[in-house]
Image: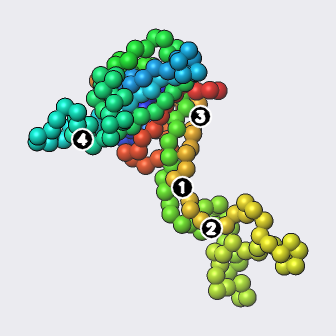
């Protein structure tokens, strides 16, 4: 992995090619992401890059001493200390990426959307939309029961639970009703259609996991 960035899903739209072909795209506000820490094999046992995203707006507080500067960012001292050491504005999101070329970066540098170019293939990671407690039809795409006499009064129930006397229990991993969504999801091998350097946005072909406004991470594809 050589490229990575943190972004926020803005929504979906469509663009047109010169031939008039319609391409559905997801707009992602990618960065800018300051480099908070660089981990090396000699010091940490592995090489990685720690990036921040979404700067915290400082809250004005009266009679604030220098040693309590973390309070205006609503952070505890350990969390504030790593931003202070790096000399960057505290951020709401911190993520670590194991890049192969960490030597090309320096603490305090900003990673922007221009790290990618149109035509790049990327993997997008995010948390899927939450659907709450859902039944088996919505959660597992199961069929309805027959709507004839003797089947009711419920036609959307999961059906048979298994044998009665043996094994006298429901097997694990049986598709039943339950919490649906709010899972870590990765969509692989998506194409970047356009990079908007002025707005710091990436236009990625197709859909990516998560609702609008959710935080996603983008890195060059593993496939």
User: Which residue position holds label 4?
Assistant: 71
Mark carried by residue 177 = 2
Q: Quadrant of the N terminus?
A: top right
On the image, which quarter does residue 80 sit in?
top left
State if disc 2 and disc 3 touch (CB < 8 Å): no
158 left or right of 164 in image:
left
Mark 4 → mark 2, Cα distance in angstroms: 44 Å
Query: How is this picture coloured?
Result: rainbow
Mark 4 → mark 3, Cα distance in angstroms: 40 Å
160 relative to 201, above or below: below
User: Circle 4 — which element?
Assistant: helix
User: Which residue position holds label 1?
Assistant: 181
Q: Nearer the viewer, residue 128 or 120?
A: 128
User: Which residue position holds label 3?
Assistant: 188
Q: Nearer the viewer, residue 97 or 65?
A: 65
Mark 3 → mark 1, Cα distance in angstroms: 19 Å
User: Circle 1 — which element?
Assistant: strand
Residue 114 in sight here: no
The x, y position of residue 219, in whole percent, is: 52, 27
Q: Nearer the viewer, residue 89 or 222?
A: 89
State if disc 1 and disc 3 touch (CB < 8 Å): no
Mark 1 → mark 4, Cα distance in angstroms: 35 Å
User: Circle 3 — which element?
Assistant: strand
Q: Who comes first in sequence, dot 4 or dot 2? A: 4
Q: Please name the residue shown 33% across and 23% down the image.
A: 85
Q: Who comes first in sequence, dot 1 or dot 4? A: 4
């Amino acid at each position: 992995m050589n490229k990575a960035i943190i972004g926020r899903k803005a929504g979906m739209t469509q663009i047109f090619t010169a031939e008039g072909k319609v391409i559905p795209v997801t707009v992602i506000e990618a960065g800018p992401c300051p480099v908070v820490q660089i981990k090396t094999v000699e010091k940490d046992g592995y090489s990685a890059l720690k990036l921040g995203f979404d700067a915290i707006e400082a809250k004005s507080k009266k009679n604030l001493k220098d040693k309590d500067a973390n309070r205006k960012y609503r952070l505890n001292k350990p969390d504030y200390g790593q931003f202070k050491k790096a000399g960057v504005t505290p951020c709401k999101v911190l993520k670590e990426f194991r890049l192969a070329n960490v030597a090309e970066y320096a603490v305090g540098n900003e990673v922007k959307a221009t790290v990618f170019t149109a035509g790049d293939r990327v993997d997008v990671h995010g948390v899927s939309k939450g659907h709450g407690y859902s039944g088996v039809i919505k959660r597992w795409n199961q069929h309805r029961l027959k709507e004839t006499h003797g089947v009711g009064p419920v036609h959307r129930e999961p059906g048979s639970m298994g044998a009665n006397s043996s094994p006298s229990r429901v097997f694990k991993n049986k598709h039943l009703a339950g919490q649906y969504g709010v899972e870590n999801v990765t969509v692989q091998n998506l194409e970047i259609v356009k990079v908007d350097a002025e707005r710091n946005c990436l236009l990625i072909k197709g859909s990516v996991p998560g609702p609008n406004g959710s935080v996603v991470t983008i890195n060059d594809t593993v496939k």
